[in-house]
Amino acid sequence: MHTASDILAGRGRRPGESDDPTSTAPRAFGVRRPVLQSRQVTARRPHHVFAGDRPGEACGVFGVYAPGRRAASLVYFGLFALQHRGQESAGIAASDGQTLTVFKDLGLVAQVFDEASLAGLEGHIAVGHTRYSTTGTTRWENAQPTHRQIGATSVALAHNGNLTNTADLAHELGVGSATTDSDLMTEAIARAVADGRSDGRGLELALVEVLPTFSGAFSLVVMDQGHLIGVRDPHGFRPLTLGRLETGDWVLSSETSALDLVGAKVERDVEPGEMVVIDAGGLRSFRPFPPARPALCIFEFVYFARPDSILDGRSVHAARQEMGRILATEHPALADVVVPVPESGIPAAEGYAQVSGLPYVDGLVKNRYVGRTFIEPSQMLRDRGIRLKLNPIPSTVAGRRVVLVDDSIVRGSTTRQLVQMMRDAGAVEVHLRISSPPYRWPCFYGMDTSDRSALLAARVALDDIADVLGADSVGYLSLPGLLEAVGGGDRSCTACLSGDYPTDVSGASDKFELERVARR
Ligand code: SF4
């Protein structure tokens, strides 16, 4: 058994190496008599204590290729840093060059894994996933990594994003049992691997063949017993970055901030449309897709990504502060204080305060430990709504005109409660300032907002939104202002704000379509 400090120090057993430190046994690379082990532990369904009305977050993916180290342990810490991207399930697949093992369950990373489960994930290659469901329900079968065994080859896949041709793909493959787009992708890849290649590059060649048949958003980390592969769809909707450990070994991560925790440095982004293959021969880059316009999700900057991450060369925190500065120029307010909605509203509120000259004060405190629980909250607690997550500080807002800065309004229910909370705490006026434009269009690329009728700005005229939310005024950042703040307008997806979808979404399915088909 290795302790967490052993793990971070790289004192795990090498693949094929004896626990005896004097052993000279060779490391076992390559594909030999693989045995896929997957464990299904008792599934417990986590409950949202308070889901709020933010768009559902994306997923987090992480991969490590590090000969001589326990890759799964590094992936564990990487997933820990990516927990904000998905809290429904977590999983890791690992290979020691011969055996590919998968362990996954519903719950947070720290709930799913302990030292015993990590000890069973041996080997120098590993991929991991934290899930927020955008296709399929929250159940063990839909947790990732997904996996298939094809003769001598085992494949595991972790996916961030959402396909927009899921139904077509399911029809073409004739798959009635796949319940998520990620499982469908794994099935398509497995079939291509099974098409009979024995030169050791089966997975690599299968991906080159199959990837162009996928449409929509997919940042993937994929592995077999001997390879770690990272893929970003041609538009690069979801981020994927490449890092290096101090040993020179490779790491793939949804966000740069997760590299910091495992001691890796940013090498570069995996480019939109790029596939990188990492094995004993080093790193190779492929371009399996026709060229396409880059379209990184602009909501990664607004809300999803951690503020300490770098996206497309731009600091997320700096971009959010700039959104606040521009917002103050576009929508000034006669007020006394600027109050952020923690936590993603904080940098924008700082920027707003800088430009407006109004004092920045903490008017809301976040209960940091509210998220998912395995104890079902009572109806009374549900009715308390946002107070489970945020509570006002009356001494900073009472008798004052408050500028309340938040990053977005999706359905509006949370925002209405926040405005009322400020009034209950004694604020005499509440002026809402939102550091993104009105969210009017559904997202089909990995955010859980496919029902347009639920979007506040799609059903209520702009002039009426302040009344609906109970605010004295509302000001949204303009789209040109947002593009200026992220510094890369022509490389962004803005579809939920503009209606301009970078891909054909006419075939996009709803979240549960595959499960309905599977039940027929
Ligand atoms: Fe992001 Fe909106 Fe595009 Fe979805 S539609 S990928 S949330 S910018």
Image (cartoon, rainbow, N blue to C red):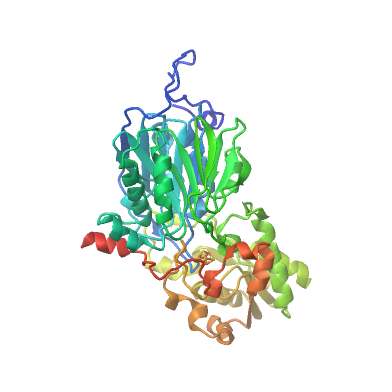
466 to 90, vertically: above or below? below
279 to 205, vertically: above or below? above
- At 47% from the left and 63% from the top, the residue drawn is 447
328 to 511, vertically: above or below? below
User: Residue 245: which quarter of the image?
Assistant: top right
- Quadrant for the C terminus, please: bottom left
- At 55% from the left and 73% from the top, the residue drawn is 497
Q: In this view, does 196 lie to the left or right of 293?
A: left
16 to 324, vertically: above or below? above
Percent x, y for residue 103? 37, 40
- Quadrant for the N terminus, please: top left
Percent x, y for residue 367? 54, 58
Percent x, y for residue 495? 53, 70
User: In the rendered image, is residue 119 in sight?
Assistant: yes
How many tags in the picture? 0
Q: Nearer the viewer, residue 439 or 347?
A: 439
- At 43% from the left and 57% from the top, the residue drawn is 132
Q: Which of 19 and 181 is in front in this view?
A: 181
User: Residue 258: which quarter of the image?
Assistant: top right
Residue sitting farthest toward the left:
520
User: In the rendered image, is residue 112 in sight?
Assistant: no
- At 44% from the left and 20% from the top, the residue drawn is 17
Q: Nearer the viewer, residue 383 or 165?
A: 165
Percent x, y for residue 42? 30, 45
